[in-house]
Image (cartoon, rainbow, N blue to C red):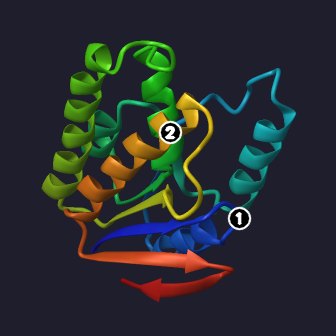
Amino acid sequence: MKVLVTGGVRSGKSFHAESLVVGEPVVTYIAPGPSPEVEDDPDWAARVATHRSRRPQHWHTVESIDLPEALAAAEGAVLVDCLGTWITAQLDELDAWDAVLEEWEPVLRERIAAVARAVAETERPVVVVTNEVGMGVVPEHRSGRLFRDMLGRANQAVAAECDQVLLVIAGRVLTL
């Protein structure tokens, strides 16, 4: 089973994704985003704490922005939450926010392809959470447009390797 769970912010997508693997005896939870101990962002720390409190104690958490490596090393079922934080970390690492697109985009496209390959190649159940983008207005700022475009590409690449794509809206799940 390989599932991509997408939806808007606070749609219930993480909760639903967790429910898909909660019965598994071994779960590796991959958190590919900023460290939860980011001192200057109490909102982020609170969000991470909420997610941690929902996880069963036997789940193993891996915090890594190297998704292909983390997927390869994972044991049991895998829950990745989420591609949006991974894209943000990649854009940060590539110093892409203010750089010329041609300087970093080929590297990011290859990293997205590597994640999609890692999902395709794993034999274990994988559930990937992501944010749905592009359903609203075009972002005013370049950073918003970069994030939307790159996450949209990542979503498409990972969805192509999944058996199922679920859209969560207001806590309701639609199979696409």
Residue 162 screen position, x and y as percent = 25, 68
Q: Is residue 1 above or below residue 96?
A: below
Residue 14 screen position, x and y as percent = 59, 64
Determine whether, in the image, residue 176 is placed left or right of residue 55: left
Q: Which residue is mark 2?
A: 145
Residue 16 screen position, x and y as percent = 57, 75
Determine whether, in the image, residue 95 is placed left or right of residue 52: left
User: What's under tag 1, amino acid-wise?
Assistant: Arg
For label 2, the SS is helix
Q: Quadrant of the C terminus?
A: bottom left
Residue 112 screen position, x and y as percent = 27, 40
Q: Is residue 28 above or below residue 70?
A: below
Q: Quadrant of the N terminus?
A: bottom left
Q: Nearer the viewer, residue 95 or 119?
A: 95
User: What's under tag 2, amino acid-wise?
Assistant: Arg
Q: Do residues under tags 2 and 1 come within 8 Å of each other at their CB atoms?
A: no
**Residue at the image position 30 percent from the left and 77 percent from the top:** 164
Q: Quadrant of residue 77?
A: bottom left
Q: Is residue 167 above or below residue 58?
A: below
Choose mark 2 or mark 1, whichever is in front.
2
Mark 1 closeness class: few <14, some 14–19, many ≥20 residues within 10 Å: few
Residue 10 marker: 1
Q: How far apart are the two marked residues, 2 and 1, measured between alpha carbons?
A: 21 Å
Nearer the N terminus, badge 2 or badge 1? 1
For label 1, the SS is loop
